[in-house]
Image (spheres, coloured by chain):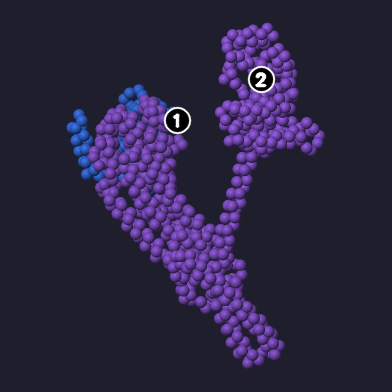
Chain colours: A purple, B blue
Amino acid sequence: MTLHLWLAPPLAHELGRALAHFLWQGALLAAALRVTLFLGAERSSRWRHQAALFCLLALPLAFGITLALSLSGGHSTVAAPPAAPRVVFNPVIAGDAPAAPVDWLAWLAPLWMGGVILFYAFRLAGWLRVDRMRRRGVCAAPAEWQQRLRALAAAVRISQPVVLLESCLAGVPLVIGYWRPVILMPLGALAGLSVEQVEAILIHELAHIRRADYLVSMAQSLIEGLFFFHPAVWWISAVVRAEREYACDDVVVALRPDARAYAAALTTLEQSRWPAIQPAAASNGGNLVRRIRRLLGEPGSAQVPNARVAALAGALALVVAVAAALVAWPPTKSFAQSASPAESSADKQEPAKGIEPAHQSIEDLQELLAGKQKKIQEAEETVERAQELLQRNAADLDRALQNGGAHSVDFALEERMRKAEAALQELAAQVRQSQDLVDQQRLTALLNQLDAEQQAGKSQQLLQQQERALRQKWLNEDVAYIISPEERREFLVLQTDADRDRFIERFWQRRDPTPDTAENEFKEEHYRRIAYANEHFASSVPGWKTDRGRIYIVYGPPDEIEDHRSESVPRQVWRYVHIDRVGYDIEVEFTDPGGTGELRMVAAPASHGSYWQLMVSASDAAGAVARSLRTGGFPILTYPVQGRPGMVQVLVGPYPDEASLAKAKAALEAGGYHPVRGQ
Amino acid sequence: MTKSSDLPRPTDAELEILTVLWSRGPATVRDVHSTISRRRPAHYTTVLKLMQIMTDKGLVKRDEKQRAHIYSASRPREWTQRQLAGDLLERAFAGSASSLLVGALAARKASAAELAELRKLLEEYGEDKP
């Protein structure tokens, strides 16, 4: 009875299912590793070790995911029964229905748990014993060796302090601990080998510390214990161990190239080890021979001799695993469908009701769905019938009690009760089946909801992207000409969108000529100018990007336009009587010598000769300068300097030859100007 | 003279002193103490007392010919190791412990055949590249 309770929770069933699935998963991962190692035969042992370790860590991951999937999939089945019908009718079923078939999957869980606990208990005892070796029967190694170890640790790039001890219990050199690592050398090893050889051995141990192999070994043990029943796991673990040693050997040979001395040291240690740890095993292809072949560069040493056997075993395991999986589940429960609660509860149905045949295609599934809908309708009808029957029975009972118990009524009542019971049993079965359908529908709804949420998330993302693009456009288009370099820098270092929005708001507020009113005349005028520029000056580039667009947006409409667009060289001169903070009498000339259709501002009309350039920065000075020069008879051209509001450039010229150029310069200098030669 | 089989199994503290003696050879109490205190704090008098007890038990021998008494282990380490390894619990968990061990050599001892093969390999390699 207790065992029955143990097996009852669906967790046991799901656990058993995950374990059975693990049979093929483990075999598959091992096969994948086999192939990876085959392909990476030329790679370093470090790489191969990492591949094997990755594979080893994937084992619990695969198991965990399978379990989580089947638990989350089976959850609604677990939660649904107490809802109403099954609890009410359970006693009726328990009385009459034949015993349910044994759920052998659920039996796997307790067996497995027992194994894991036993295994872990042994490993814990082993670990305690190992940890005790740090303290028991040890003494500090001679000081000169500690010193050599420090130098070697630096060479292997280990920063944490490493303690070197001699141990009378360690049969072989060992590393114990990760956070406070200790190297144990068997008594006599330090004296029995040459200094170079001991150093080589120490480098090997230090490499273990550097690679955190002690931790890896612990993790390996945990995983081995969890999947103790799977030979593939043991094989993967053995690969990790072997590659680990190869990798450490590689470190040794990299630092101490005398491979033969190192190999000899290993052999000597092996020979002189005392058999305390474990009695010598029969020749199991011990990997020391392989390692030494590898160290000495023997041909074919890297190849695992029993590779073919391993591959064959892997394939065999795979076949067995797949067969087991097939036997364990009827075809309905293919892996892809195992997450569906409808399928997971299907095997609780009595075989008499028929196990659903394979439904591989969507049409089949739809058919199944339609069938279930029909069944649920039938179930509802039966419920109605049963309720009717029960009501009638109750009424009859009342009457019978009032009549003082007439036998004829009893008989009829009994008959009806039996009918009701049968109907209820049928109902219970149907309800259980329909439960599956409900679960399936719930899952579909859940998936739909998930989809919708995903969609919502996407549109949210899209909105954010659009907002971001708008802000980018604001900076690089809308206010490109009027934002000061300081403001631009300030804006670019802002971190959050909220900050950026606040900045934009303040930007316009600062420029609002009437901050007390709700309207911002400046902003409105600015956007009107952009719109105007885009409408009137667009050519191959948008209007706001053209020179005329830029001047228009920054300085507004000119007071006068001299239009020569119909001439051979299209030309336009804009005159501003006054530009705030720039000056008076500003002339800006645009031409299109190449006939591209876009008028460009004349910054340097090179073809006409050379110019003198004057930069005038004071706001009112520009106008005065321009006026006085013009009245002085100088041909001048004034235009605002791009990107520097408030600066005006005055071009004096053009002068066709050096003589007139020099004369103009003298005249300008006499007037107190300092002209710069322009093109 | 006690028979070898009558020697008591050393305690952990005694084993430590024996280990020092096996490692460094015959030594004075001061030598033993200085080695021990390099690993953990220890009082000289504690070590002295322990070594006196061990002399009484027959675990160590004392040479009183010189002014400073020289102690040495009365049994070779192999003997004590065998004695300790005979522990039932030790044997029960040795296998489990061995798979946790990380070190230059495998937990399993190589067989005689494997050792012979190793020797041969080394010899061949030595001939190729003297």
Of residue A168 and residue A342, the one placed in the foreground of this image is: A342
> Which numbered dot is residue A159?
1
Q: Quadrant of residue A277?
A: top left
Of residue A592 and residue B46, the one placed in the foreground of this image is: A592
Q: Residue at x 58, y 61 (%)?
A: A445
Looking at the picture, does residue A290 appear above or below residue A233?
A: above
Q: Position of residue A656 (x, y in %)?
A: 58, 14
> Which numbered dot is residue A143?
none
Of residue B27 and residue A362, the one placed in the foreground of this image is: A362
Q: Residue at x 71, y 32 (%)?
A: A507
Q: Residue at x 66, y 8 (%)?
A: A667
Which amino acid lies under the numbered mark 1 shown in the image of this protein?
Ser
Q: Quadrant of the C terminus of chain A?
A: top right
Q: Quadrant of residue B35?
A: top left
Looking at the picture, does residue A470 appear above or below residue A23?
A: above
Q: Position of residue A592 (x, y in %)?
A: 59, 28
Q: Give the residue number, with chain letter if any, for mark 2.
A: A637
Which amino acid lies under the numbered mark 2 shown in the image of this protein?
Leu
Q: Residue at x 31, y 42 (%)?
A: A41
